């Protein structure tokens, strides 16, 4: 296992896809902090580093879907996995070592973005308005969500030997999950009541406009709302959407969901990989 990890980390440091993702995370961090400062000051508002500081989190799943597919797909194309089996490595150790390295790669990308965002944002806009405990918890939540993304993408990439097909499946899956999360969140944010205006004319022919708050038929209630809230919290894409503006109210529960996804998907992946016919 140690030799597998050493070899994989060595290959990771030589991976062009990994360094492209890290460069993107670096540039994105600088860009968002500078743009946040310029747009808020131009409008006469006080710039806050809190605004969209964690916006990179929404891209973690997308980056990992592409990176993991390319990184693990190379092992099939080069026959590396077959060679590892020939020299005596178990399928479980091969799968687990790949998952660990892919998870570490995703966390490094996030760490690069967070580090440059702190380095640029704090000198420009000062410290966070939010309490430090919330900032720290959000950082931890993003990193654990990365593990969930990595486990999902590793499952697809390890079971699909065609690198191009695995990449398409992973990217489409993450985008679908993201679309569902954004749609559900918009539904949950629908106001409970809406204002309606009506024109009333009295007996003297004088008209007046009255405003009344009425229940919003699009507002989710009861069991439907509970189900949507659960899906929004359970999906890692829903978690990252909440982390973007530090709006997550129950970060420990979100981390628990990500941990469950990571463990369950990793277990299913290792079980399926044991039975896979390696060509």
Image (cartoon, rainbow, N blue to C red):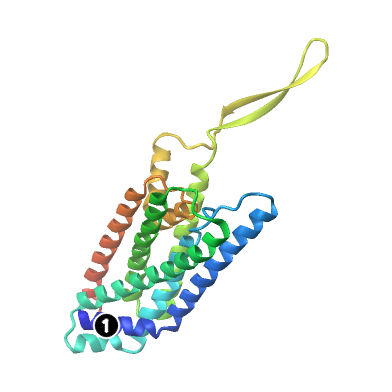
Residue at the spot 16% in from the left edge and 86% down from the top edge: 88
Vertical side of 220 occupied by 48: above or below:
below
| Identity of the residue drawn at 36% across and 52% down | 234
Compared with 64, 161 (above or below) is below
* Position of residue 169 in the picture relative to residue 123 (left or right): left
Q: Quadrant of the C terminus?
A: bottom left
Total number of numbered labels?
Answer: 1
Q: Quadrant of residue 125?
A: bottom right
Residue 74 position by quadrant: bottom left
Q: Is residue 62 visible?
A: no
For disc 1, the marked residue is 6
Residue 242 seen in this snapshot:
yes
Q: Nearer the viewer, residue 196 or 105?
A: 105
- Whole-percent x, y for residue 151 in the image: 32, 67
Q: Nearer the viewer, residue 3 or 232?
A: 3
Q: Residue furthest top?
A: 203
Q: Position of residue 80 (x, y in %)?
A: 29, 87
Q: Look at the image and tell me in which quarter the N terminus lies.
A: bottom left
Secondary element at image label 1:
helix
**Which is nearer the eye, 143 or 134?**
134
Snapshot quadrant of residue 216? top right
Residue 101 % position (x, y): 32, 75
**Crowd band around label 1 with a 10 angstrom C-alpha radius: few (<14), some (14–19), many (20+):** few
Residue at the spot 82% in from the left edge and 16% down from the top edge: 206
110 horizontally vs 192: left or right: left
Farthest residue, direction right: 205
In the figure, is residue 44 to the left or right of 258?
Answer: right
In the image, what residue occupies the spot 34% across and 62% down?
148
Q: Position of residue 161 (x, y in %)?
A: 35, 80
């Amino acid at each position: 296992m140690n030799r597998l990890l050493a070899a994989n980390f060595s290959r990771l440091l030589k991976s062009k896809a990994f360094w492209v993702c890290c460069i993107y995370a670096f540039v994105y961090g600088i860009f968002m902090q500078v743009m946040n400062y310029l747009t808020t000051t131009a409008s006469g508002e006080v710039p806050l580093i809190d605004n969209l500081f964690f916006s990179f989190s929404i891209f973690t799943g997308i980056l990992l879907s592409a990176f993991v597919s390319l990184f693990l797909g190379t092992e099939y194309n080069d026959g590396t996995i077959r060679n590892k089996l020939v020299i005596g490595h178990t399928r479980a150790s091969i799968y687990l070592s790949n998952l660990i390295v892919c998870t570490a790669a995703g966390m490094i990308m996030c760490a690069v973005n967070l580090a440059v965002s702190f380095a640029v944002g704090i000198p420009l806009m000062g410290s966070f308005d939010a309490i430090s405990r919330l900032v720290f918890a959000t950082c931890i939540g993003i990193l654990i969500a990365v593990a969930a993304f990595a486990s999902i993408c590793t499952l697809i990439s390890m079971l699909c030997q065609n690198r191009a097909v695995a990449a398409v499946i992973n990217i489409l899956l993450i985008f679908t999950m993201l679309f569902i999360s954004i749609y559900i969140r918009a539904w949950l944010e629908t106001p409970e009541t809406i204002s309606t205006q009506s024109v009333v004319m009295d007996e003297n022919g004088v008209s007046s406009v009255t405003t009344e708050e009425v229940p919003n038929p699009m507002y989710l209630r009861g069991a439907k709302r509970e189900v949507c809230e659960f899906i929004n919290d359970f999906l890692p894409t829903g978690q990252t959407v909440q982390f973007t503006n530090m709006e997550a109210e129950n970060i420990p529960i979100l981390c628990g969901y990500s941990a469950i996804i990571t463990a369950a998907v990793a277990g299913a992946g290792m079980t399926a990989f044991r039975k896979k016919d390696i060509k």
